[in-house]
């Protein structure tokens, strides 16, 4: 499994993702500049968090037109893996690789803290090492993480089990009180119908070493690596 971590102007979690994949998990990993078009050697593309292009217009709206994204779309269409974290999730939505859109947090404030996530589906390359119903302690850090989709899209997401993680409490209960940003149905991360593209707002790379307060996020990356075996 070879990972490519895309670097956009304004990315600030690219080194975090690279470190976890390359040094913690010992996976073959390279940075990919946003102007690069040839990504054929990679099995999984990682769109990291940050503030691509300063988050001007809408989050991810400019990055969606970076040269590399045309290749990432083709990469996904070929059935290869793509994971977008925080701003990466926003870019996946803007590029049409995932359905829906991101709004400003309901509080209109930037939120940065640990949250609990309930795993909803383990039948994907991104969650196969996790247990359904398991709780993950992973941090969020975003101002526009309020996931929105029309009713038909929500019905489709639920029907196809495309919601992979939801915001919950430490007992696994989903409620308005456990929702940090107003996201519909407490959605924290979704995949496409083909299950090879995953976007989530929480940062698993920031919860992959015990020194950071949690190792619950590393299972997502381990799942990806295991999917190639």
Image (spheres, helix red, strand yellow):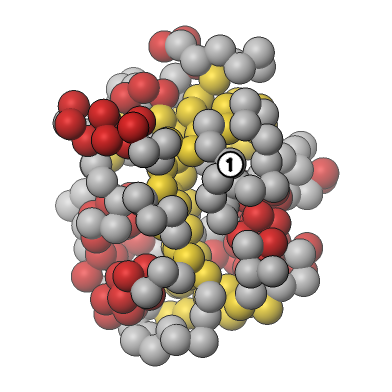
131 lies above or below 196: above
Q: Which of 11 and 193 is in front in this view?
A: 193
Coordinates of residue 59 in the picture (x, y in percent): 28, 50
Q: Is residue 209 left or right of residue 174?
A: right
Q: In this view, does 10 lie to the left or right of 97?
A: right
Coordinates of residue 175 in the picture (x, y in percent): 46, 11
Q: Quadrant of the N terminus?
A: bottom right
- Residue plotted at (32% across, 36% down): 157
Q: Nearer the viewer, residue 189 or 19?
A: 189
115 lies above or below 205: above
Q: Nearer the viewer, residue 228 or 66?
A: 228
Asked where in the image residue 139 lies, by quadrant, the reply is top right
- Residue plotted at (53% across, 50% down): 124
Badge 1 crowding class, 10 Å Cα cut-off, few under 14, some 14 to 19, many 20 or more, is some
The residue under label 1 is 122
Residue 123 makes an appearance in the image: yes
Residue 203 makes an appearance in the image: no
Q: In this view, does 179 lie to the left or right of 97?
A: right
Coordinates of residue 9 in the picture (x, y in percent): 38, 69
Q: Is mark 1 on a helix, strand or loop?
A: loop
Asked where in the image residue 75 lies, by quadrant, the reply is bottom left
- Residue plotted at (61% across, 17% down): 172
- Residue plotted at (30% across, 51% down): 98
Q: Quadrant of the C terminus?
A: bottom right
């Amino acid at each position: 499994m070879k990972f490519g971590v895309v670097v956009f102007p304004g990315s600030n979690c690219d080194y975090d993702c690279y470190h976890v994949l390359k040094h913690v998990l010992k996976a073959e990993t390279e940075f990919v500049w946003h102007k690069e078009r040839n990504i054929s050697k990679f099995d999984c593309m990682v769109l990291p968090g940050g503030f691509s292009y300063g988050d001007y217009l809408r989050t991810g709206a400019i990055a969606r037109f970076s040269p590399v994204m045309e290749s990432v779309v083709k990469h996904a269409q070929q059935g290869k893996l793509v994971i977008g974290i925080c701003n990466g999730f926003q870019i996946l939505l803007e590029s049409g690789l995932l359905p829906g859109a991101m709004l400003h947090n309901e509080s209109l404030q930037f939120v940065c803290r640990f949250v609990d996530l309930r795993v909803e589906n383990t039948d994907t390359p991104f969650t196969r090492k996790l247990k359904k119903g398991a709780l993950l302690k992973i941090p969020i850090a975003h101002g526009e993480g309020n996931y929105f989709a029309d009713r038909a899209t929500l019905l489709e997401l639920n029907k196809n089990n495309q919601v992979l993680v939801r915001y919950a409490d430490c007992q696994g209960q989903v409620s308005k009180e456990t929702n940090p940003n107003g996201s519909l149905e407490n959605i924290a991360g979704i995949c496409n119908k083909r299950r090879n593209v995953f976007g989530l707002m929480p940062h698993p790379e920031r919860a992959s070493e015990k020194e950071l307060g949690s190792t619950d996020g590393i299972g997502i990356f381990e799942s990806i690596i295991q999917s190639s075996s």
